[in-house]
Image (cartoon, helix red, strand yellow):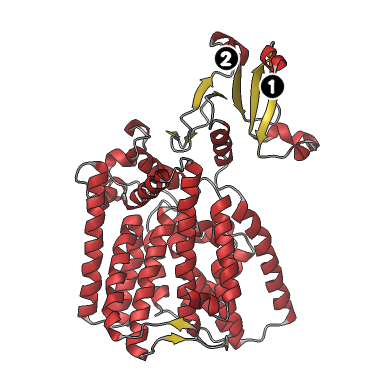
Amino acid sequence: MSYIFKSPYSRYFAAGLFIFLAASFFTIGYHHPDEHFQVLEFANYKLGNSPVSDLPWEFNSRVRPTLQPFIAYLAIKCLTFVGIKNPFTYAFVLRALTGLFAWYIISKMSLLLLNHFTTETGKKSFIIMNFFLWYMPYISVRYSSESLSGLTFLCALYCILIFYRYSEEKKENFLLTANPSKNFEYLPAESKYNTGFLICSGIFLGFSIFFRFQISFAILGLGFWLVFVKKNQWKNLLIISSFAILSMAACIYLDYWFYGTFAFTPYNYYKFTVLSGRTQVGDPWWYYFALFILNAIPPISIFLLIFFVIGIYKYPKNIFAISFLFFLIIHMMFGNKEMRYMFPVSFSFIYLTALGMDYIYDRYKLSKVYSTIFTFMIILNFIILIPRSIAPASEKAPFYNFLNNYSIHKKTTVICLGKTLYEGAGIKINFYKSPNIDIVVLNKNMKINDYMNQHDLNEVLLFYDKAVFNDEHEGFETEKIYSIFPEWVLKYNINDWEKRTAIWSIYKITRQELKNKN
């Protein structure tokens, strides 16, 4: 790892490490329910803390590969062994490990690919976008199937590229230069390690499939590149394929251990999604382009897309271009489209976009107008980068964290009106729920003080979805103790915006005579 920090771009790598770790710490919660319910709740079940009845349909249908929940299970077991029992610490460790993994392989791959760029501006753009494009830290630290399948696939590509770089160029040891315009990379010193890279690439490919089956589309593109572009020796393909099959066999055994019965999850997934027609109804083929333009924030997204198209056009035989196009085109054939489905090929997108930028930088002298536009894009990107890297990934997560800390040393009754706070996508959330918390769901017409009197409760917490709780309860006092909106913001109720906004808060309702004694 030391050579990463000895490179001419070490300051970018160091800053990238910092922001990845910051994002892993602050972006608590989940980006999509699958990131939680099909991973953490699955692990929580294996730990004995969630009943089968509270798990999503994917469990009973045996469509979810369990490699990722197994890793979470092991991590939580280790943390519990050393005395850590906070679910938010568990989730943070998983995000931090994912972020470190992402930072490490992105750094190594960036250094390996620098000699593909002609201009120094192109090289810097490539490295900077990998770490500081506004959505990259956020998606790189997600302990999700999309992120981990993309990262292990990237590891496989790295091993293959290292193998061919050594075989074809016969470089040795470390290549270190003080001139940032030249390449800086690590290559093995002895040829006996060559086969090891092919073995590792196969293992990583197998794992990537069992993190998320859809990465197989990119692997098809990789196979196309190996056979038709690289005209690979069948011996090399056999090595890669054999060890991919071995790692997948290990994952199938994990599925057997996890479910308690044999489950061939790839076929089950195919049967319950593709054959059932779940993937056929939905969005038009071009919808990913519209999603990217809207979600990646125009005008940044528009410029990125233009340079990406240039990169694909200029380098159509590139290994990243072919694997990305296979991945994208096959996804476009299915009706159900979400932007997260493209997360596994985020690095490929940035690399091809940077190649497009490099081509323009090298071929044309940009005028002051273009320089001004680029400056504006950079400023806009960093304005978005900071909040996206420190804001919670889900709005309920800070409330779970607060309630978990509040109830560490005492039993706590939490009243919710209408439906429980510990629910998402219609499924119960057990992973973040402290055993000291008792959730009570009341009809909105029922008086809270009546319930407290009936059950002889002196204190309860109330989760409420408005900024101000106006109901008065005779004999009880109400105090707001938590809200994600600071009080100074709520003082400025311009045009009565608070009434129209879901401003979640937690209130403490205490029996008055008890409070007077204290």
**Residue 295, picture quadrant:** bottom right
Question: What secondary structure is marked by label 2?
Answer: loop
Residue at 67% across / 31% down in the picture?
Answer: 481
- Residue bearing the label numbered 1: 478
Residue 476 location, x and y as percent?
68, 15
**Residue 186, picture quadrant:** bottom left
Residue at 26% across / 48% down in the picture?
Answer: 255
Say above or below: 178 vs 269. Answer: below
Residue mark closest to the camera, 2 vs 1: 2
Say above or below: 170 vs 442. Answer: below
* Residue located farthest toward the front when viewing the structure as drawn: 82
Name which residue type carries label 2. Leu
* Residue located farthest toward the top when viewing the structure as drawn: 454
**Residue 469 shows in the view:** no
Residue at 22% across / 74% down in the picture?
Answer: 239
Say above or below: 167 vs 445. Answer: below
Q: CA distance from mark 2 to mark 1?
A: 14 Å
On-image quarter of the C terminus: top right
Please tell me which residue lies in front, 427 or 68: 68
Name which residue type carries label 1. Thr
- Residue bearing the label numbered 2: 457
Q: Which comes before the other along the chain, label 2 or label 1?
A: 2
Question: What secondary structure is marked by label 1?
Answer: strand
| Left or right of 428 in this view: 199 | left
Residue 351 location, x and y as percent?
49, 73
Residue 270 location, x and y as percent?
28, 51
